[in-house]
Image (cartoon, rainbow, N blue to C red):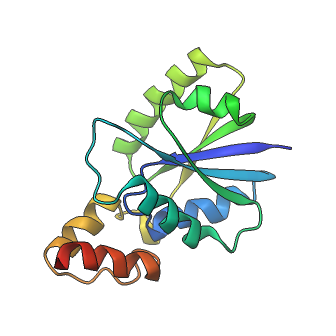
Amino acid sequence: MRVAIYPGSFDPITNGHLDVVKRASKMCEHLIVSIIYNPNKTPLFTLEERFRQVKGAVMNYSNVTVDTFTGLLVEYAQQKQAVSIIKGLRAISDFEYEFQMALMNRKLCPDIETIFLMTSNEYSYLSSSIVKEVARFGGCIKGLVPENVRREVIEKFSS
């Protein structure tokens, strides 16, 4: 079975992330959306909340599962017997960072390929950080995140 990993913090998952999930799920037999736990960051949502949000957002994809991990991505990918890592790109600035990471991952594990997917035009401006900033100031985030996530983001900033 050809397994691919789509890693990210997904804090929160956006419709741009879901666009990548939709397209990547057609490229492999099994796609694992892997939520990274980074002890050096303070996310808006707990790992458990993000897991639940992502699971709800991808439930209509029969070949997509959700998992969490900490540590080196390539070691995690090896454990899951993945052959590729999917990375979504919005802009050149994303590419510079992701290219460097892809080269390091290739050095650590040459058997796992990194696949870059350009975001769809309609989501090229969208990021989790922008969603949180707009919501923090009471702006409308409808259409930027899945509906179940939208309610939770609004609730976080209204308390």
User: Residue 121, percent across and down?
Assistant: 46, 67
Q: How many labels does the image show?
A: 0
In this picture, residue 137 sits left or right of residue 130: left
Residue at x 71% of width, y 69% of height: 61
Residue at x 68% of width, y 37% of height: 84
Residues 57 and 93: in front is 57
Q: Residue farthest to the left?
A: 137
In this picture, residue 139 sits left or right of residue 65: left
Q: Quadrant of residue 39?
A: top left
Residue at x 45% of width, y 72% of height: 122
Residues 72 and 92: in front is 72
Query: In the displayed structure, would residue 42 be above or below residue 96?
Result: below
Query: In the displayed structure, would residue 126 be above or below residue 29?
Result: below
Residue 62 can be seen, yes or no? yes
User: Residue 4, percent across and down?
Assistant: 69, 44
Query: In the displayed structure, would residue 20 be above or below residue 8?
Result: below
Q: In which quarter of the image is residue 14?
A: bottom left
Q: Quadrant of residue 66?
A: bottom right
In this picture, residue 60 sits left or right of residue 50: right
User: Residue 9, percent across and down?
Assistant: 42, 50
User: Residue 5, percent across and down?
Assistant: 63, 44
